Amino acid sequence: MAKPKTSAWRVPKGFDGAFAEFQTIPNVGKATAEDLVRLRVRGMKDLAARDAMAMYHAIGKLDGQRHDPCVIDVFMAAVEFARTGACKPWWKYTPERKAMLAVIHEQKPKAKSRRARSKR
């Protein structure tokens, strides 16, 4: 996960409790806890209702950069923990993430080649 450009952690006002609570989740450290509160996740109940892929895209938009796909795995692990209490290492979610991304990739319409577009 990309570290903030400044050395200060960016925790929105009123999210200190959630920031601390998220760090009790296995696989979640300060950087991920910070990302969760920056996404305005208010606590475990709110996290349980979230979608890991949507959070991944949202944090990328907030930061103006694409994050490592392993961030999806960490978000998946955190959401699963919030929903069920299941505690698996984040890398156990990698095959599920890769399968999910493959399905998404297959569903996207194929882009026309440059040559085909230039002949119009």
Image (tube, rainbow, N blue to C red):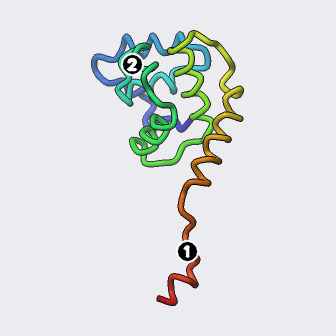
Q: Which mark is residue 112?
A: 1
Badge 2 amino acid: Asp
- Image quadrant where residue 69 sits: top right
Residue 22 pos. (x, y %): 48, 15
The residue sitting at 64% across, 37% down in the picture is 97
Examine the rendered structure and indicate whether residue 7 appears above or below residue 114.
Answer: above
The residue sitting at 39% across, 41% down in the picture is 62
The residue sitting at 67% across, 29% down in the picture is 93
Judged from the image, the secondary structure of the residue bearing numbered disc 2 is helix
Q: Which mark is residue 46?
A: 2
Residue 76 pos. (x, y %): 57, 27
Relative placement, left or right, of 72 versus 44 is right
Relative placement, left or right, of 14 versus 105 is left
Which comes sooner in the sequence, label 1 or label 2? Answer: 2
The quadrant in which the N terminus is found is top right
Specify few, some or many for label 1: CA neighbours under 10 Å numbering under 14, 14-19, or 20 or more: few
- Image quadrant where residue 84 sits: top right
